[in-house]
Amino acid sequence: MNALKNKVSLIGRIGKNPEMQMVGVSKDYSLTRFSIATDESYKDKNGQWHSNTQWHNLVAWGKTAELISKMVKKGQEIMVEGRIVNKVYEKDGEKRYTTDIEISDFLMLSPKNDEKNLEK
């Protein structure tokens, strides 16, 4: 094996419209945050079907952040590629942990005008 890599691919539906903000010392760099839901179904030993939904926090930077904020709407299906980023911060004297997927690439799977999947 040449190298160990931190790489993840997800296909899911957008949970809410992405929010872009400008960050950095002079507020000149784009950051967009949003989440997607992935589902998997399975049958238990009694033959009953169950669904397991996982929510993933996504972060995009720069041009990718700008494109996502313009193109992506709640309810659309999207494929993202990126890497897992774990962070630790302190709030009110308590350590908190977050896990985000930092997006390097994305592909819209729902048409832009797919009205049945979009909420206005």
Image: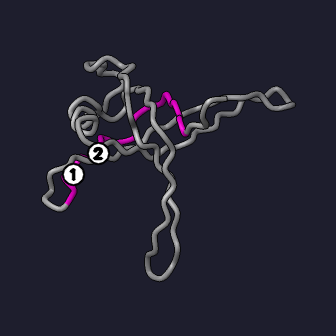
Residues 100 and 51: in front is 100
- Identify residue type, mark 1: Gln
Position in image of residue 77 (x %, y %): 41, 26
- Disc tally is 2
- In screen coordinates, is 68 left or right of 58? left
Q: Residue furthest right?
A: 45
Position in image of residue 59 (x %, y %): 37, 45
Residues 68 and 7: in front is 7
14 in the magenta segment:
yes
Instruction: Identify the residue at image location x=27%, y=20%.
Output: 112
Q: Is residue 80 above or below residue 29?
A: above
Position in image of residue 68 (x %, y %): 27, 34
Q: Is residue 63 above or below residue 34?
A: above
| Dots 2, 1 in contact, CB < 8 A | yes
56 in the magenta segment:
no
Instruction: Identify the residue at image location x=31%, y=19%.
Output: 114
Quadrant of the frame with the C terminus: top left
Give the number of the disc on residue 32.
2
The main secondary structure of the magenta stretch is strand
Q: Residue furthest front?
A: 2
- Helix, strand or loop at label 1? It is strand
| Stretch of the chain drawn in magenta | 6-24
Q: Residue furthest bottom?
A: 93
Q: CA distance from mark 2 to mark 1?
A: 6 Å
- In screen coordinates, is 102 left or right of 40? left
Instruction: Identify the residue at image location x=52%, y=73%.
Output: 95
Instruction: Identify the residue at image location x=44%, y=81%.
Output: 92
- Helix, strand or loop at label 2? It is strand
- In screen coordinates, is 81 left or right of 61? right
Give the number of the disc on residue 21.
1
